[in-house]
Image (cartoon, rainbow, N blue to C red):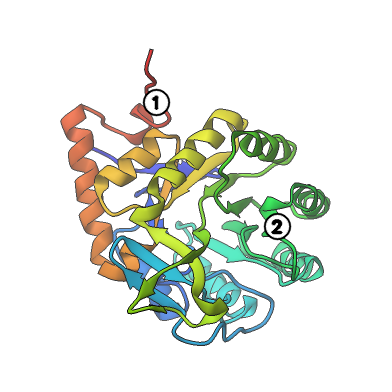
Amino acid sequence: MVSIATRLGGFSFDNCLMNAAGVWCMTKEELAAVKDSVAGTFVTKTATLDYRAGNPEPRYQNVPLGSINSMGLPNQGLAYYLDYLLELQETEPNRTFVLSLVGMSPDETHEILRRVEASDFNGLIELNLSCPNVPGKPQIAYDFETTETILHEVFSYFTKPLGIKLPPYFDIVHFDQAAAIFNKFPLKFVNCVNSIGNGLYIEDEQVVIKPKNGFGGIGGEYIKPTALANVHAFYQRLKPEIQIIGTGGVLTGRDAFEHILCGASMVQIGTTLQKEGLAAFERITEELQAIMAEKGYEKIEDFRGKLRYMD
C-alpha cells in the first residue's frame, strides 16, 4: 500500500498535501472544509494583529497558466484564527494545524509572536517573511540584514515550533547567503515559495487587477520551475533539521512528486485549489500515489530529495 504520510517539525500527517496560505483559509468555514478533506492539514490565512480588509477589488484574477493577485493581506485578525485553532485542539487533539502570521512592522510581528507564545496553541507557526513591511524597502526576506535581526530577536523569546514563508530567490549567491542565515536558528521549516512578485497580466489593453496599477504576485504553472529550484537549493544548503514545504505550480500529482523529489517534506496547493476547489486534493493525492506505485515507492522518504543530476 502506497503511503503519502509525512512528518514536519516533529508532527505527523497522513497526507503530505495541504492548502497554501491565502486559499480556502479566510474563514473558519473554509478551514473546516480543508480540515475535513483528504488534505493532511491546513494553514490559516496569514494573520495580522487586527482585521484587515485588504486591497480594493478586483485583486485576484485567474489567468490561463496560473493567477495574479495583489490581495493586501485581507484577514480576520490573529485572535480569530488563534481562537479557532484552540477550539480544534479540544475537539481534535490528535491533529496538528499551521498558524500563518505576519506583522505590518517589526514591532507588530513581535507582539503577535509574543501572544502566540503566551497562548496554549501547540501546532506549527509560519512567519511570513515574503511580505513588504516598510514602504520603499524590499520584502523582508530579500533584506538579509533585517531577516537575521528579526530571527535573532524572535528566537530570544519564542520557543514554539516556527518556520518561515519565503519569496523566490533567483541567484545562487542569494541561496548561499539566505541559507547561511537560516542555519543559525532553530527553524523547523522553510516554505518555498510565495508568488513571484510584481508580474503584470493584460487583457484588451488593460490590466486585470486594480491595486498597484495591475502589478501582482504570479502563481500557478508559471512558477513551478522557480519553486522547484528554490526547494532543491535550500534542501542542498540547510541543516537536516530544517525541513522544506514546497509551494508553487502544483497542478497534478506529477508536480507534487517533483517537489518531493527536490526535497520537500510537505506540498502546498494554491492556485489549483482556488480554481478547482477541494476536489483537487483527492485528485492530486490519487495521481501522486499512482506515480509512486508505478515506480515502486512505498513512502515519500523513498524518493524525497533524490533528484538525479547528469554526469
Q: Can residue 9 be spotted in the picture?
A: yes
Q: Amino acid at mark 1?
A: Lys
- Please say if 86 is above or below 242: below
Q: Amino acid at mark 2?
A: Ile
Q: Residues within 10 Å of mark 1 (few under 14, many from 20)?
A: few
Farthest top residue in view? 311
Residue 165, horizontal then vertical, whole percent: 58, 54
Say which mark, if any, is on residue 306: 1
Q: Position of residue 199 (x, y in %)?
A: 48, 63
Q: How many marks?
A: 2
Q: Residue at left 57%, top 64%? A: 99
Residue picked out by circle 2: 140
Tell me if residue 245 comes above or below residue 260 in the rendering.
Answer: below
Q: Secondary structure at mark 1?
A: loop
Q: Quadrant of the C terminus?
A: top left
Indicate the position of residue 134 as horizontal and vertical percent values. Answer: 75, 68
Q: Which mark is residue 156?
A: none
Image depth: mark 2 or mark 1 in front: 2
Q: Is residue 9 left or right of residue 285?
A: right
Query: What residue is rendered at 25% in x and 51% in y?
Result: 252
Left or right relative to 71: residue 120: right
Q: Position of residue 171 (x, y in %)?
A: 59, 39
Residue 208's image quarter?
A: bottom left
Distance in Å between CA atoms under marks 2 and 1: 31 Å
Q: Is residue 63 left or right of residue 193?
A: left
Q: Quadrant of residue 205?
A: bottom left
Residue at 34%, 27% in the rendered image: 302
Residue shown at the point (52%, 66%) measured from the top left: 89
Given residues 73 and 159, the one toward you in this image is: 73
